[in-house]
Amino acid sequence: MITLNFIVNDQKHELEIEADEMLADVLRYRLGLTGTKISCGEAECGVCTVLVDGEPILSCNYPALKAEGKNITTIEGLAKDEDLHPVQEAFVKHGAVQCGFCTPGQIMTATALLNENPDPTDGDIEYALNDTLCRCGTYPMITNAIHAAADKINSGKPIEYPEFDFGGGMEVVGQVVPRPEANKKVTGEAVYTDDISFPDMLFGATLRAGIPHGRVKKLDITKAKALPGVQAVLTADDIPGRVNHGLIIQDWPALIGVGETARYVGDAIAIVAADTEDIARQALDLIDFEIEPLPMVTNAVDAKADDAPLVHESGNLLKHIKVDKGDIKKGFEEADVIFEDTYFTPSYDHAFMEPECSIGRPLDNGQIEVYVGSQIPYADRDQVAEALGLPYDKVRVRGPLVGGGFGGKEDIVGQIHAAMLAQVTGKPVKILYDRHESLLVHPKRHATQINVKLGLKKDGTLTAAQTELYGDTGAYASLGAKVMGRATTHSTGPYIVPNVKIDCYAMYTNNPPSGAFRGFGALQAAFAIECLMDQVAEELGIERVELRRKNALRVGSVTNTGQHLTESVGLLECIEKTEKEMLAYTGGEDPFLAREVEGEPNKRRAWGFAVTFKNTGLGEGAPDNASAEIELLEDGIVETRISSAEIGQGLVTVLQMITAEELNLPIDQVRVYLSDTDLTPDGGPTTGSRQTYISGNATKFAARTLKNTMLSTLSEKFNLPPEKITFDKGVIQANGQELTFAEVGQIMREEGREPKLIYDYKSPKTTPLGEAGDKHFAYSFAAQAIEVEVDLETGEVSVTKAVGATDVGKAINPLGLQGQVEGGLIMGIGHALTEEFIVEDGQVVTDYLSRYRMPSIHHVPDEIKVIIVEDPTTDGPYGGKGVGEISTMPVPPAIVNAVYNACGVRFHTIPIDQDWLAGEIKKKK
Amino acid sequence: MQLYQEYLKPQTIAEAVDFLTSAKGSTAIVSGGTDLLLDIKQGRHDPVDQMIDVSGIKEMGQISLEDDFIYLGAAMTHKQIIKAPLLQEHARCVVEGCGLIGGPQVRNVATIGGNVSHALPAGDGTISLLVLDTEVEIASPEGAAWQPLIEIFAGPGKVNFDRANNLVTGFRFKSKGEGEGSAFHRVMRPQGVAIAILNMAAWVKLDESGNLDKVRVSCGPAGPKPFRAVKTEAYLSGKTWSDSVLQEASKILAEEVSLRTSKHRATKEYRHQLLPVLLRKVMDTAIERARL
């Protein structure tokens, strides 16, 4: 140990530390300043930024001893005298905060910029923030916030909320309101799982298979157990309950035992709990472990071959999903022209900024408590309880804030392990994955191969569509069958097609598992169909927007699964509005023709276009329900409780707004409490763009019921008809009296009516594929136009403009909606230009964040136009439907189509490979 | 895993050399640590007993102009370099190269000495220093000695001096004369590690009629070591810059470099395709600056 003297946020500290500790670790774990987050630990992402003598540095890779005698400013030191720093205030008001995990890093980097350059241009901001990453893609709002903060600092101009040309129309719903948790996120007070610690907490670590397929031959933990500081070493033999977990199909062993088979590199073999993380990792090295390699299969198409190595004894086919509509043979016979092509999409990592962390903790009441940032707290609870051999109510899952999910936090990763170690040691145990482990272990996006064959009349009318899809679900099922189900039903696009035949094969391989990821299979499907639609338009000589408009689903259409669409089909309006804005940019010129760039003779620009649709909710026969509890507390605050997760999408705000709207309450009198399996009823999974609709409805009806209960109490008490009682901004007028919510609550309690209730919401029924009836209760629609610039010499591609319209039914939370749509767009740009999760022979190549690049502020288009279409759906809350996923989906095909329009080279795979592109352009010359 | 046992912070070059030579176990010189610490964390470099942080050595943290030479301390950070008026005037290529590295957080700690000592074939700082005919000062127990920068590289990540007893302390190059200019440019791949697919720097001296009097060109990765394109330079010196000269120079450059395919990053063919593009860009810019 060595002494470190330094000043942090104006306070002198003298600490005893290890020589090789990094500054971020000292700040977080020795000083408890957990506002500084660690996301990558490899100096890539900027999240851990703090100021040293005023200069921003990356504290995760900055030896603490370097800070000797220096002045450190962390996010906690920015606000003075209770007032937020202008940058913090601007981030709150401008919606520059989503999941919030990168927020401290963004704010510290932005503050350093403003200290040096009080009035930065967009270019200055881009240069300064280029390596400070935000997976929610909040960059446009961050840029706006920095300008607003600069204005306040320079001229005292107050920071206003942004205005939007959508939403509005109601008291609270549709208005611009900040996130209730935004203040905590900008000051560093926000608590994520790794920010929690307990006095006697142990640290866990996991031994991994390391090879994609193999049988465990030997596993000797004697030496590891003997290492001083090690409290437990557990193997498969120590699992008290069910060995396998899994969301739908339980095929994933929590630990692989001797004689058992590991099916991917990340399979867990043994777990250790020790006094420190360092000792836990040393113990892993002392485990005597031998694994015998088995033949592997690493591609979905190969996996279907008769002689393919078997990933599971039951075979490699997870599910064959079929859709048949009309008569496919007749459909192609009726066609004048037939087009067919094959497309490939790679795997992608969610790369949420907050790596996975779980804390298991035994409670005095016999429960095991698990803290985890999860998208499905109840599924975690059930799977942990089953593994531990406990009744469900003996496990309590509590969700702190979640630093991004995007579908990647739906499965079990460390939850069972932390709970097992806690159960055995009797102490709290934290398992924190570093970025490397996160990249290796959790389920990814399905890589796909999609063949599309379309039959059309000469005028462009679709007569038939046949598609064949292969999806690589990796070693375990996760949500693979559902994801590829959505790929199946979305593979013929949002079009009227009378005759359809689809075959989809979700295949097991020895790659890391694939599961849910924003777009959920429908993203891959959209890439294939929207590329082919552009190719078809060109061949037929039909304008490409016109071809889509001609075939677009509309009210009265029948989908490929036989669903009659009776309302809320905003696709044509999305197409119209997007086209109009795009043409405004080109001054009416053909946007799809390549244009030279002034002063850049080797560059070309052109637009690309794509449309898409996405179901809201689980659908296809899965019961899709949520229960919300609501309580009028003694202090007059109304609390809404539901287990659903806030992963950055803005659910807390939406539920707060809905509660306030229904009760005519000021928004600050509503509190939302989420993700606690003991205290919040089940809101179901945060997946499928379903929470605003499902949990929103549950909350709406819960609040309505509470209001009715309040009304009937007052009606009886004052002997007044309920319509004579009015609610206005938290004040209740009854019988000439003004009552507060607290007073009404007191009256109810006095009368023995607990002002607390649970509402069980059940969504409209859907039916499985192959049966008659609706597959989904609502669909969102979108059109996207993208302008790219292609460098004909280097093959470099950048997105210069983006115009998109999304039909969300109703813009309930405009500030959050803007963030979701822009962020989804930016993730789509990442999928097309920067990201690819590479696995070779079952080994992960992109195993550090430096090798897996998410889009940075540099990739944000120069201009973005977000258009919101509000075509309401009857059963949605105020007409609202899902929006979490759709904004990402049309972006990759729009970019690929734009690249073709700019330089004549067509990609059938993403991401865009500039190397190949430059070669193809050269060949064409 | 312990990254290092001890973290030493010498205040003078002599003290740093003393730490190196008197160390019982393994040592490493570190400044910003943006490469080295990650290499240790990710298993590409063994942990060391003593980490010797030279960022506080004042002699290594200065930029000066003396007797027509610019002196650049090895512990100068990328931020200090891009903000230094002397370098903006005399070494535009270095300012450009260092300005493209990382974000402000990395530029605040990463040093030019670290970039050079890491000895990667495509270090942006290294490649840009090479066209200035830079000399490097290496301190050892025997004292300090200057030698041409190009001579210290032995292979990817390898240097010709003994890291256990020597350290890079500074650089010097001729200040900018009449009719001289330099430029740096690179092409990146949006996917994967942030190392240039190909980078290039040029320095030119024009004669009174505006023809190329002398030219220097460097690029990377163009072999196991940072590369000076001496044949291309020889061809270009004395020429009048034109499209046909560019074409011929590109051919010579293509013959003297050794480009290869690196998996998941770039093909050899693509790198070859980029050679004339980058050569035109850096030469155009350098000539434009030389005319000012």
Image (tube, rainbow, N blue to C red):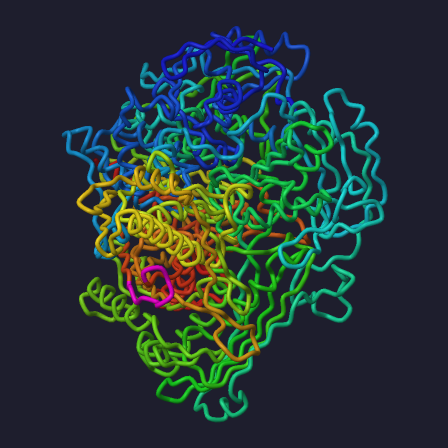
Question: Quick check: can you spot residue A867?
Answer: yes
Instruction: Using residue A113 as the reference point, say whether residue A246 is left or right of it.
Output: right
Vertical placement of residue A915 versus A772, above or below: above
Instruction: Using residue B115 as the reference point, say whether residue B103 is left or right of it.
Output: left
What are the residue bounds of the magenta stretch? A869-878
Closer-to-camera residue (A435/A658): A658
Give the residue displayed 64% in from the left and 20% down from the top. Answer: B48
Closer-to-camera residue (A888/A404): A404
Closer-to-camera residue (A207/A565): A565
Give the residue displayed 76% in from the left and 64% down from the top. Answer: A314
Q: Quadrant of the C terminus of chain B?
A: top left
Closer-to-camera residue (B243/A88): A88
Question: Quick check: can you spot residue A794?
Answer: no
Give the residue displayed 61% in from the left and 45% down from the top. Answer: A381
- A16 drawn magenta: no
Give residue B200's position: percent from left, percent from top. 42, 41
Give the residue displayed 44% in from the left and 28% down from the top. Answer: A36
Give residue A793's position: percent from left, percent from top. 38, 56
Q: Quadrant of residue A197?
A: top right
Q: Main secondary structure of the magenta part?
A: loop
Q: Quadrant of residue A449?
A: bottom right
- A871 drawn magenta: yes
Give residue A93's position: percent from left, percent from top. 27, 39
